[in-house]
Amino acid sequence: TNPSLLILPGDGIGPEVMAEVRKIIDWIGDKRGVTFDVSEDLVGGAAYDKHGVPLADETMAKAQEVDAVLLGAVGGPKYDDLDFSVKPERGLLRLRKEMDLYSNLRPAQCFDALADFSSLKRDIVSGLDIMIVRELTSGVYFGEPRGIFEENGERVGINTQRYTETEIERGARSAFELAMKRNKRLCSMEKANVMESGILWREVVTRVGKDYPEVELSHMYADNGAMQLVRAPKQFDVIYTDNLFGDILSDCAAMLTGSLGMLPSASLGAPMANGRPKALYEPVHGSAPDIAGEGKANPCACILSFAMALRYSFDMGDEADRLEAAVEKVLADGVRTGDLSNEEGVKPVSTSDMGDAVIAALNAN
Ligand code: NAI
Ligand code: MG
């Protein structure tokens, strides 16, 4: 049977960047003979406009059946005053929750051509290619008790960092599986020096590591990890960390690479019957209402998200490599959308031209 993909373009620039991914899917069908069963549906404000909810039940059901979901972006000023329960991002949250996507993959990859867009010096980031795996469904954002309580005549705000062995272990397995598909190096980050959950984290990750003898496992305190990420980020390959530390470390790592328009992500869950994880791929950026409808958006984050789908959901790692190389080639040739063209004399190209340039680079290879 053909690999199946549910495409949810969403709002704002979502449909614009997704149109460029469709070109690549067609190209793979034509040139590689791999036909994807693609279905397309609404999410976010677009779904609210049609159904009165940001994700219809039928769409949710479809998401549970396919091999992978690819999402554009949701939200926009038109929906800012909606009731919380039907806000566009609730559609995204519903997908993550019901698919139980506990492992959030945030690559930080810095193509040489874009090294000058980084917040750091070129030498430190050029050629950077690391992956942060953040546990996404537990930890201090969800632990009980939580709330603001009265105590001794004043209020106290409480959140609880809580991790079960099962939660640590399933995320660790997904990180080790990734490490096996990459460079077989994994660094686990916690604060075992001051946190009980950190002690358990280190113990469980070490135990899971015994099942992956080929992977070189190291441990680092997360505060040192933050320092090392900006001092010498290329020392890392895969980083596995909890929800809170991962939130901060992945945003920090994102700025090593330059533009929001270049950053893909994946959220993975438990393996399905076919052995592949439940998966949702999406660019890190939002719906960019300030440029929506103008053909200015950079489609690379969405294209690179699809490359991640090829690698992690469809066992097409070679095609993923080729697609990433094509994006890199286009950038090296100086083809730039507006977000990447602050240099003198570089005329920005449109969303569609950028997609066409990637196709041309694929053809040239
Ligand atoms: P944003 O990521 O949409 O935009 C931030 C800035 O980056 C804007 O100036 C935008 O033009 C630029 N930008 C973003 N992606 C770009 C691309 N591919 N090419 C060129 N420039 C790009 O974040 P913002 O403005 O905070 O939020 C806008 C809307 O998006 C809000 O409704 C927000 O709730 C939603 N949002 C949705 C997300 C999602 O769907 N996962 C994530 C973040 C925000
Ligand atoms: Mg964040």
Image (cartoon, rainbow, N blue to C red):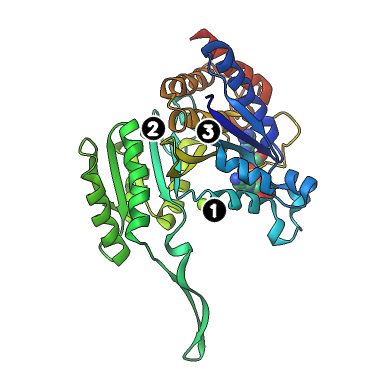
**Quadrant in which residue 183 is drawn:** top left
Give neighbour class at mark 3: few <14, some 14-19, many 20+ (Cα, 10 Å).
Answer: many
Q: Nearer the viewer, residue 17 or 58?
A: 58
Q: Is the CB atom of the residue marked by disc 3 within 8 angstroms of ligand 1's nearest atom?
A: no
Q: Is residue 119 visible?
A: no
First reached walking from the N terminus: tag 3 or tag 1: 1
Left or right side of 253 for 304: right
Q: Position of residue 237 (x, y in %)?
A: 33, 37
Q: Nearer the viewer, residue 80 or 177?
A: 177
Q: Which residue is mark 1?
A: 97
Disc 1 secondary structure class: helix
Outermost bottom residue: 153
- 127 is higher (above) or lower (below) than 233: above
Give the spatial CA distance, label 2 vs label 3. Answer: 17 Å
First reached walking from the N terminus: tag 2 or tag 1: 1
Q: Nearer the viewer, mark 3 or mark 1?
A: 1
Disc 3 secondary structure class: helix
Checking the image for residue 251, the label placed there is none
Q: Residue at x 78, y 49 (%)?
A: 78
Q: Is the CB atom of the residue marked by disc 1 within 8 angstroms of ligand 1's nearest atom?
A: no
Q: Residue at x 53, y 18 (%)?
A: 34
Q: Which residue is mark 2?
A: 128
Q: Nearer the viewer, mark 2 or mark 3?
A: 3
**Quadrant in which residue 260 is drawn:** top right
Q: Three-letter amino acid code at disc 3? A: Ser
Left or right side of 344 for 102: left
Q: Position of residue 301 (x, y in %)?
A: 56, 33
Q: Which residue is mark 3?
A: 305
Q: Nearer the viewer, mark 2 or mark 1?
A: 1
